[in-house]
Amino acid sequence: MAGTEVLMAGFGGQGMLASGKLLAYAAMDRGMEVSWLPSYGPEMRGGTANVTVCISDCPVGSPYIAKPSALLVMNQPSLDKFGPRVKPGGLIVVNSSLVSAPSDRKDCTVISIPANDLATQVGTARAANLVMLGVYVGWSGVVDKATTIRMIEKEFAKKAKFIPANLAAFKIGFAEGVKAKGGKR
């Protein structure tokens, strides 16, 4: 693996910064070089929020990425703003529970997933971000499932009652990502 960049975007409070942090931790745990660059409006919850995570097997030169390899979007404004920036051949994961107009990018793989609906099915709508993370990890293989699960358990250790639903959300997303990739992982 030379390197990959993923941009995760949504409204503040949708958990995309947390998903980015979990991805970064999982990559660091595997010995990879990582940068994590959050960006959010002053209003936080309900305002815009995005994070860029760069993962590489050599030092990351800059945390700012103009054209990410992958985009995970929780809402329509994020897709409208960042969708055109994804590199041709890249991946766009769209939360179809909240995005009414899917991406029209023909030069990228687009996975539409009802993240909020799936998270609600496994216990909590608040874990939709972990469904999205699971799709990305399952499709890309940039980090492995077991390491990411360990990072989720570690992150929620002080709030242990949330671990089962968060793990279930990640796992259902992971299965969807593997399925979208063609069952290889």
Image: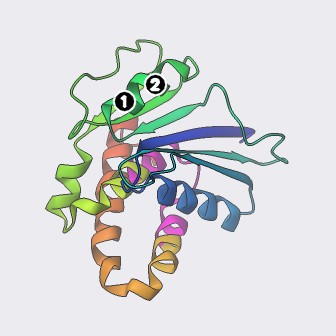
Query: From which residue to which does the magenta span run?
Result: 134-149
Left or right position of 39 against 14: right
Left or right position of 82 against 6: left
Q: Circle 1 sits in a helix, a strand or a loop, which is it?
A: helix
User: Which quadrant does the N terminus fall into?
Assistant: top right
Inspect the magenta stretch and tell me whether residue 137 lies in it.
yes
Tag 2: amino acid? Lys
Q: Nearer the viewer, residue 44 or 100?
A: 44
Q: Circle 2 sits in a helix, a strand or a loop, which is it?
A: helix
Tag 1: amino acid? Pro
Q: Which residue is mark 1?
A: 77
Picture quarter containing residue 86?
top right
**Residue 128 locus on image (x, y percent):** 30, 54
- Vertical order, 121 against 59 (above or below): below
Q: Is residue 179 visible?
A: yes
Task: Give the residue displayed 62% in from the left and 58% down from the top.
Answer: 24
Give the colouring mode of the picture. Answer: rainbow
Q: Which residue is mark 2?
A: 81
**Residue 62 locus on image (x, y percent):** 79, 40
Q: Are marks 2 and 1 in contact (CB under 8 Å)?
A: yes
Task: Give the residue displayed 53% in from the left and 71% down from the top.
Answer: 151
**Residue 170 locus on image (x, y percent):** 36, 60
**Residue 171 locus on image (x, y percent):** 34, 61
Mark 2 → mark 1, Cα distance in angstroms? 6 Å
Q: Which mark is residue 128?
A: none
Q: Nearer the viewer, residue 102 or 77?
A: 77
